[in-house]
Amino acid sequence: MSDLLRLSARPTEAEIDAWHAVVTDAHAHDTPAIPPPGRVETAGELTVPTPHSRCVRLAVPHPDSARGYAAVASLRLFDDGPRRTAAAVEQLAVRPGLRRRGLGTRLWRELRGVLAEERRTSVSAEIETGGEGEHFAGALGFTCALPLVRYVQRVADESAEPRLPDGYRFAEWTGTVPAAHAGPFAVVREGAMADMPLGEIEGGPDRWDAERVTALQSSVGARGGEILTVAALAPDGTFAAYTEVVLRSPDGIRARQYDTAVSPAHRGLRLGHTVKARMLELLRERWPAVREIVTTVADDNGPMRAVNKLLGYRPERSVGVYQLRLPSDPFRVTPGPSGTPGPSGTPGPSGTMGGTDTRSGA
């Protein structure tokens, strides 16, 4: 287990299988009650680039070569926008039977070297509170920059009726935003995200235009998943609110909330509740096998927590975006704690941190 492997942008089917085996092994041990990621999801993440960023993916070979990898790690490097000097550890997973052997630390040291070479000023990861990942990150100097709670909604249990104010209407699509909507959709996304809760995370919200929203939604399908969007259009035809839900694998039973946002000019009209209620109806029609929707919400996002409570979301577990500020000398690499186990993994969708309702306003 001495040689670290660096995956190419086009991993082989065998490399995808080996990576997926580590992720699902760690997932089954750490969060057995939560449906694991599907192989399609893993393959999509490893083979389809995330828009406006690059990924560095590392693997530690298993001592039994027939079992592929012992541990894996993925680092996302943002290439533009407010976070162009930041990075995110999207995954760091160690097989349960091989923990406490320094594998997570070894992967971290290599990632830390990449961060130095790229002259990044901070790195973050979404981590479960109270687990091995939090212990590992804390020993490396990470601190919680944005507390979150993960919530789950059982699709069969809710039947809220979507009621729009007079003059408003729905716009809905499956897959990539239609070209005619891309520009107006980017406008509401840009405006609604301006006050998104970021805690102490370095940088600000991404800047959005037609190209960026198209690339984000297109990447979901390219990775083998599906994305549903429900928007509310104001009487003048502008976008007032929207919500997105993603199914990362065709056989998945748990969908993931991406963004929900309401334009500041249209808040107080229950549009956040309305588009999410309509999404429930649409989801039942398009994905009848889906049982749950999962989302994370910042602790200080009172309006969105209130909307989700009305829709029957229940808390599942506490998580947080943990951040490490990197030293002013980018080539000073601080070793991690020897023998500390790595976290089970912190996957996040394109353009978001963990699939979140992080936009203020209802």
Image (tube, helix red, strand yellow):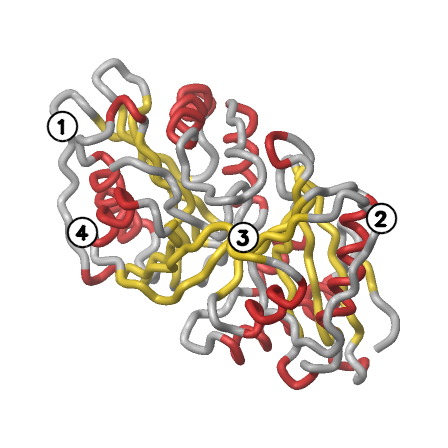
Percent position (x, y) of residue 133? 57, 69
Residue where numbered disc 2 is placed: 331
> Which residue is located at x 45 percent, y 20 percent?
183
Q: Are marks 1 and 2 in contact (CB under 8 Å)?
A: no
> Which residue is located at x 32 percent, y 27 percent?
263
Q: Quadrant of the C terminus?
A: top left
In the rendered image, the vertical position of residue 360 relative to residue 347, given as above or below? above
Percent position (x, y) of residue 291? 31, 63
Q: Earlier in the sequence, mark 3 or mark 4?
A: 4
Element type at mark 1: loop
> Which residue is located at x 60 percent, y 65 percent?
138
- Frontmost of labels 4 and 2 is 2
- Frontmost of labels 1 and 2 is 2
Residue 121 visible to the viewer: yes
C-alpha span from label 2 to label 3: 28 Å
Q: Are marks 3 and 4 in contact (CB under 8 Å)?
A: no
C-alpha span from label 3 to label 1: 34 Å
Element type at mark 4: helix
In the image, is 107 to the left or to the right of 168?
Answer: right
Residue at the farthest top position: 236
Q: Earlier in the sequence, mark 1 or mark 4?
A: 1
Q: Amino acid at mark 2?
A: Phe
In the rendered image, the vertical position of residue 354 relative to residue 100, given as above or below? above
Residue where numbered disc 4 is placed: 310
C-alpha span from label 1 to label 2: 57 Å
Residue where numbered disc 3 is placed: 348
Q: Amino acid at mark 1?
A: Pro
